[in-house]
């Protein structure tokens, strides 16, 4: 599929996998790797190690992105494996924890197809086709500032808990939380894409 697709209430089974109690458990993992972010920029401060510390960051408009979360949690690892069974390739999981009225990452795109599962709160997503000959090679250092030169129309949708959104590889996207928000992002680099790059 070459266009984004939103499916309301199609990811309700994923909601318990990443609720606030699951987040508390994940934050306490000793090998946690999280980016601390505000308004699309990295913030130089320690990773929060519990929800109480996270709430203090929220009061400053700061959230986190947990990288490779399938390494931190067995249920998320099973979810990644289930995706890999249906869509053969490399699958990794990121968790977005975003305070209301803020964004986590700025406009960006991926070399992978992305499936976003909203599990708490509400988030508005904005996406647009990438017409600027993006470099899709896995591991390449993308230049996200190029989005300023993009001329494709912006599309939008809102995700509620239990909704999912598919964003094709290479599409620009950004999201703003309208309520304190939790979401699971699965990046899938399909085997056929890996073969094409080799």
Image (cartoon, rainbow, N blue to C red):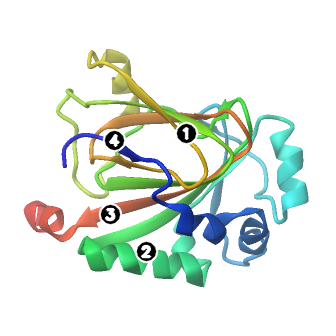
The mark nearer the N terminus, 4 or 3, is 4
Dot 4 corresponds to which residue? 142
Give the alpha-carbon distance from disc 4 to disc 2, as whole Å. 24 Å
- For label 4, the crowd category at 10 Å Cα-Cα, with few meaning under 14, some 14 to 19 and many 20 or more, is some
Give the alpha-carbon distance from disc 4 to disc 1, as whole Å. 14 Å
Q: Residue at x 30, y 55 (%)?
A: 112
Q: Residue at x 52, y 33 (%)?
A: 106
- Secondary structure category for the residue under label 1: loop
Q: Residue at x 86, y 49 (%)?
A: 55
Measured from the top left, where is residue 9 in percent x and y? 50, 54
- For label 2, the crowd category at 10 Å Cα-Cα, with few meaning under 14, some 14 to 19 and many 20 or more, is many
The mark nearer the N terminus, 3 or 1, is 1
Q: Are marks 1 and 2 in contact (CB under 8 Å)?
A: no
Q: Are marks 3 and 2 in contact (CB under 8 Å)?
A: no
Q: Are marks 4 and 2 in contact (CB under 8 Å)?
A: no
In the image, residue 176 above or below residue 56: above
Q: How many marks?
A: 4
- Secondary structure category for the residue under label 3: strand
Dot 2 corresponds to which residue? 80
Classify residue 60 by image quadrant: top right
Q: Residue at x 62, y 71 (%)?
A: 17
Q: Is residue 85 left or right of residue 27?
A: left
Give the alpha-carbon distance from disc 3 to disc 2, as whole Å. 9 Å
Say which quadrant the C terminus sits in. bottom left
Measured from the top left, where is residue 125 in percent x and y? 49, 34
- Secondary structure category for the residue under label 4: loop
- For label 1, the crowd category at 10 Å Cα-Cα, with few meaning under 14, some 14 to 19 and many 20 or more, is many
Dot 3 corresponds to which residue? 188
Dot 1 corresponds to which residue? 105
The mark nearer the N terminus, 4 or 2, is 2
Q: Are marks 3 and 1 in contact (CB under 8 Å)?
A: no
Measured from the top left, where is residue 194 in percent x and y? 17, 66
């Amino acid at each position: 599929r070459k266009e984004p697709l939103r499916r309301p209430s199609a990811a309700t089974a994923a909601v318990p996998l990443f609720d606030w109690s699951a987040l508390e458990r994940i934050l306490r993992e000793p090998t946690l790797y999280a980016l601390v972010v505000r308004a699309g920029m990295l913030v130089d401060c320690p990773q929060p190690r519990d929800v109480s510390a996270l709430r203090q960051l929220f009061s400053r408009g700061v959230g986190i992105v947990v990288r490779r979360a399938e390494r931190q949690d067995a249920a998320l690892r099973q979810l990644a494996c289930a995706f890999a069974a249906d869509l053969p390739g490399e699958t990794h999981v990121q968790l977005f924890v975003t305070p209301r009225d803020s964004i986590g990452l700025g406009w960006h795109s991926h070399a992978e197809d992305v499936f976003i599962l909203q599990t708490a709160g509400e988030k508005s997503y904005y996406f647009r086709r990438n017409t600027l000959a993006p470099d899709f090679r896995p591991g390449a250092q993308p230049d996200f500032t190029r989005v300023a030169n993009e001329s494709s129309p912006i599309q939008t949708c809102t995700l509620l808990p239990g909704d999912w959104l598919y964003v094709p590889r290479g599409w620009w996207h950004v999201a703003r939380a309208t309520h304190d928000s939790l979401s699971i992002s699965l990046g899938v680099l399909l085997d056929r894409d890996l073969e094409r790059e080799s």
